[in-house]
């Protein structure tokens, strides 16, 4: 059996809960095919637009291998679109991932 694909999801202040956890539920029901990791500028908790926090496991400086990258939407995308660290990460990672998907306003 081939190795599970690694699905990375970018967490940032103000991310939309449904944009993260809706798609991750789909991947999460197939653990033999997908492994989920959370990415962000710093490890630790990050508040969503609705308040509950997600936890960043891997930083953008050291994301490890990623096959699928999900970028959620949310009010936080307004400042994310001007974040040079995140934009540089996306440019650097894009050629290496099989899929780069944005969700809603992501």
Image (cartoon, helix red, strand yellow):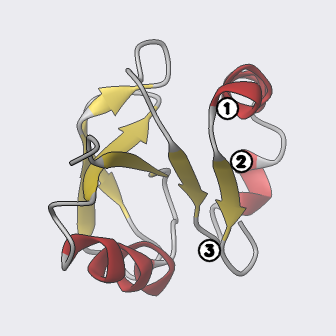
Relative to 61, residue 80 above or below = below
On screen, residue 25 versus residue 101, left or right, reads left
> Which badge, 2 or 3, comes first in the chain's sequence?
3
- Judging by the rendered image, the residue that carries numbered circle 3 is 74
Relative to 59, residue 73 above or below = below
The x, y position of residue 53, in whole percent, is 25, 64
> Which badge, 2 or 1, comes first in the chain's sequence?
2
In this view, which residue lies farthest toward the top? 61
Q: Quadrant of the C terminus?
A: bottom right
| Residue drawn where x is 76% and y is 27% of the image | 95
Q: Secondary structure at mark 1?
A: helix
Asked whether the beta carbons under mark 2 and mark 3 sit within 8 Å of each other, the answer is no
Label 2 vs label 1, nearer the camera: 1
- Judging by the rendered image, the residue that carries numbered circle 1 is 86
For marks 1 and 3, give the CA distance.
15 Å
The x, y position of residue 28, in whole percent, is 22, 72
The x, y position of residue 5, in whole percent, is 37, 48
**Along the viewing direction, whichever of 105 and 48 lies nearer the viewer:** 105
On screen, residue 95 versus residue 5, left or right, reads right
In this view, which residue lies farthest toward the front? 1
- Judging by the rendered image, the residue that carries numbered circle 2 is 80
For marks 2 and 1, give the CA distance.
7 Å
| Residue drawn where x is 45% and y is 52% of the image | 11
For marks 2 and 3, give the CA distance.
10 Å
């Amino acid at each position: 059996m081939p190795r599970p694909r690694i699905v990375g999801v970018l967490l940032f202040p103000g991310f939309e809960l449904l944009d993260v956890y809706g798609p991750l539920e789909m991947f999460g029901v197939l653990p033999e095919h997908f492994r989920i990791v959370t990415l962000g500028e710093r490890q630790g908790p990050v508040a969503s637009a609705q308040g509950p926090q997600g936890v960043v496991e891997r930083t953008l400086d050291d994301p490890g291998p990623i096959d699928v990258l999900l970028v959620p939407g949310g009010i936080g995308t307004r400042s994310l679109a001007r974040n040079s660290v995140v934009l540089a990460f996306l440019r650097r990672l894009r050629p290496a991932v099989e899929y780069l998907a944005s969700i809603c306003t992501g």
